[in-house]
Amino acid sequence: MAKKKKKAPSRRDYRPNIETEDRRAVAITVAWMLSTIAVTLASVCWLIAWFIVWQTKPVGGISPIAMIPNALWFIALVTGVLALVLMPAAYRWRSVPPPRAVAIYSVVIATVPFVGLLVTKLVEQLLS
């Protein structure tokens, strides 16, 4: 008895077993996640830059490097607001809601620029 060769599935036979999302939902979800990643990176870089500038105060006035934490904070603030605005839209347009842990992380990290500003101002007032 000869073994029968299995026929390889063609592209037409392939059907994913997951629900397909609307293009709007995918676009909003991608924008939401990209803004969450951007606020994460900007917040981490902002805190590192703020610490470096705080530790290395210039002797003769304000250094141009001292403006870097402010620019990074502004980027983190804008992308954080964008993440907070896009999250309800992602929940509205998606047929399957995103995982709860992702949503919680997005809200927490999007509020970091606001909380971080308060903490850095308090630290500056206490230590100066």
Image (spheres, rainbow, N blue to C red):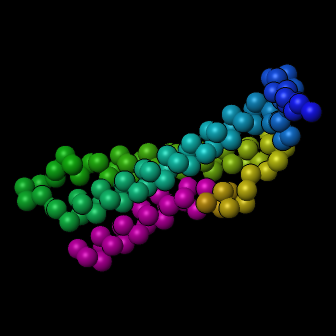
Residue displayed at 23% across by 74% down: 128
Q: Is residue 110 left or right of residue 95?
A: left
The location of residue 11, given as percent across then percent down, is 80, 23
Range drawn in magenta:
106-128
Is residue 124 located in the magenta-colored stretch of the structure? yes
Q: Residue furthest right?
A: 1
Q: Residue furthest front?
A: 1
Query: Is 25 situated above or below 106?
Result: above
The location of residue 114, given as percent across then percent down, is 49, 60
Question: Residue 99's quadrant in the figure?
Answer: bottom right
Quadrant including the N terminus: top right
The answer to whether residue 70 shows anywhere in this view is yes
**Magenta portion: prevailing SS class:** helix
Residue displayed at 68% across by 57% down: 103
Residue displayed at 74% across by 51% down: 98
The location of residue 40, given as percent across then percent down, is 49, 53
